[in-house]
Amino acid sequence: MSSNNYDNDELIFLPEESQSETETACSQGVWNVLVVDDDEEIHSVTRLALSDLIVADKRLHFIHVHSGAEALNVIEKMNSSIAIILLDVVMETDDAGLMVARTMREELNILEPRIILRTGQPGYAPEEQVIKDYDINDYKTKTELTRGKLVTTIIASIRSYQQILSINQSRIGLQKIIASAANLMEEHSVKNFCEGVVTQISSLIGLEAGGVVCAKAGSVLDIDDDEVYVLGAAGEFAVYINKKLENLHNVKIVKFVNSCLKLKQHIFESEFTVLYLKSSDYEAAVYLQIGNKISEIDKQLLEVFLSSVSVGYENVNLFHQLRTAAFRDWLTKLPNRSEFINMLDETSKVNLQNKDLVVALVDINHFADINDGLGQDAGNSTLLAVTKRLENTFEDKISMARIGADIFGLIGSETYINPETINQLFVMPFKAGEHTLPLTASFGFSRLNSKNQSGIEILKQSNIALNRAKKNLKTNFEYYEPEMEQETTWRLEMIRKLAIDFESRKLQLWYQPQVDLVTEQIVGMEALLRWPTEDGGFVSPAVFVPLAEYSGLIIDIGAWVIEESCKKLAELNQQGFSGLRMAINISMPQFRDPNFIESVKNIITDNGIEPDRIELEITESVVMDEPQIVVEALQELKSFGVKVAIDDFGTGFSSMSYLQKLPLDRLKVDRSFVNEITPGKSAFIVETIVTLGNKLGLSTIAEGVEKREQASYMLKLGCDEAQGYLFAKPMPFEQLLEFLSEQTN
């Protein structure tokens, strides 16, 4: 065996062989190497990097295919004449390479070729288990396979291939071993596999035999103890499968199986044999009830076979793990979201006439706080505690799953799945490790009707109800109604239209003048966002502003409003209307934007405006949402010179402590309170707000002033300014220019 020496591991690019050279090499004896990859560059790099490699006086002959399907066609035709398969994991599907390996080993029963898995996606599959269960020689990411490492892997794999061929050629009995192992490889359950072990051993040594395969439960079964169990059996012992070994009414079997596991070695007697199996994950004992002692030749065959059995068992375990990973939640062992959808599919088909069935989603409130505050272990313990309580409460009366980080799905009769029953589960606190935690939850319910719905559709409807429940301030649950889905569809469509119209510059800014109540001279204006419709109307801000906030569009729209307002204020200054201020509404998502403060400063500076000519209006709800963020942002902008007003004052749940911390300049009296002003009656709330403003040294402005008596009353109270239809309606900028011109004439 020889190979050229290189100074480093970089891939060395050599001239490609011509087709005639390849054919000549083939005829002289070569190692056939099948390269399976959907990336043509990988084919070229592999061929060029290994084109001069000689192993055991033979060169490599490359066969190139680009998909799993092509690979299987070649493998089926060439069979064991292929020495090595360089196999990409991800091709036409995410597991195409693994399916090639599985089909080749288990269905085509081609065991000699060595497989080197290659992937461009590290961590796609569990490296150790894939190597064990599909008889893979190596498993590397493509970035790992430098020339030096690739050469080393190729040489080692060819040696392995040679040894396997040598064994096949020298031992007739090996054919039986391979056939037996292959049959076992096809088994996907522990029970069937272990039954097969006894049957295949009996076939291998040519004797009729009954027997049992035993192991400690903790290593192979979902049983939390360390007792020895019967995993599989054949003959008269089949009735003991999944039972404890001690339950066998045969003292001899119990004694010698335990001895085998304790001594960790085979026991050969004249009437029976106990074989010891050992792998990285488990150890087991196979008791065989045979009529005579096993010959030395058969012992040698069994030794080889038992090594295949170990690999076979790990293959069974892999399928179990893959099934668990695909359809079971790793923590709670409940079905996961994928399996829950399958369960809903099946339930919907089978129970079309059962109108009592209900689906529920149970969402633990503020679960993230547990993970953040107490750690992930406490969070996992909490989920296990909730799972245990669900299982203890409902037992087998309902089906359940964990379909999200802190969301459980339930399917069953409304007798059990209803708000009262599920709320009762959360009355008592939960024990999570060292912590005792009170939990609350929100529930979304969906009744299954006679319509044949898909599982994903039922889950979507339940989730819509859950989202509504989480926003409901009065109760913690909602039942799905078709109107909810229509509302969701409408909301998404409105958000889509809003995004399109904003991108197309269709949104408008209108301006409503604000006046000094004493002189009734215009002192400023409020910028008001308008969304025009195709029929000449407008979408109400009460409708589209929450949608903009919900979707995050408010960040970009809000930045545009600030910039447009400042531009128009600068234009007013240029046309001689100086000294006016511009009031601009700010929402909570804007405060959360890390660029918000600097953006406001830059826009004001770039437009050459005095900062005190800009007044940012916030509502009480914004302040109370995240007070610290709002207070800190406004204090920084206040120090820059910007004015601050609180809008709709008195309509929310004000906190005087935060009100005192806010760097306010003005209180804005909400129109709902101004409307209460009628002749001959006092408006207590209006009086209180104006008095409070005076006490705090703040200016006050009344909005929605439509009648002269309202203006007079506010003036009498000491209110400084007003805006409303009595003085001017909101108007586009061009009309504002005309209005200001008329006022100055």
Image: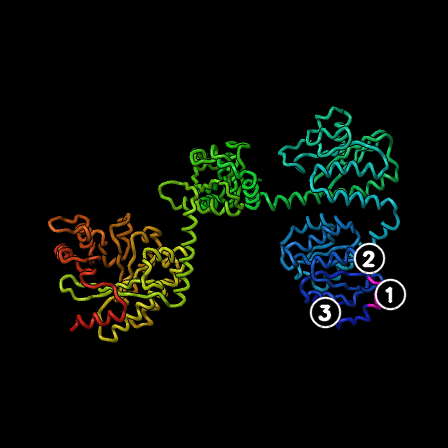
Q: Is residue 224 magenta?
A: no
For numbered disc 1, what is the local secondary structure? helix
- Residue 279 lies, in percent from the top left, at 73, 42
Residue 232 placement (x, y as % from top left): 73, 34
Q: Examine the rendering and report whether any part of residue 265 can be seen.
A: no
Q: Rounded to the nearest whole Å, what is the CA distance between mark 1 and mark 2? A: 14 Å
Q: Amino acid at mark 2?
A: Ser
**What amino acid is at disc 3?**
Ile
Tell me which corner region of the image, top left, top right, bottom left or bottom right, holds residue 640.
bottom left
Tell me the crowding category of disc 3: few under 14, some 14 to 19, or many 20 or more residues within 10 angstroms, Cα based: some
Residue placed at 66% from the left, 59% from the top? 91
Q: How many marks?
A: 3
Q: Residue at x 48, y 45 (%)?
A: 371
In the rendered structure, find residue 28 and report the number of the disc placed on it.
1
Tag 3 residue: 12
Q: Are marks 3 and 1 in contact (CB under 8 Å)?
A: no
Q: Give the mark toward the camera: 3 or 1.
A: 1
Residue type at tag 1: Gln
In the rendered structure, does residue 27 fall within the stretch colored magenta?
A: yes
Q: Is residue 714 above or below residue 298?
A: below
Quadrant where the N terminus lies? bottom right
Q: Is residue 433 left or right of residue 641?
A: right
What residue is shown with label 2? Answer: 81
Residue 37, by quadrant, is bottom right
- Check disc 3 and report its element: helix, strand or loop: loop
Which residues are drawn in magenta? 23-30
Residue located farthest toward the left when viewing the structure as drawn? 680
Above or below — where is 665 with respect to 605?
above
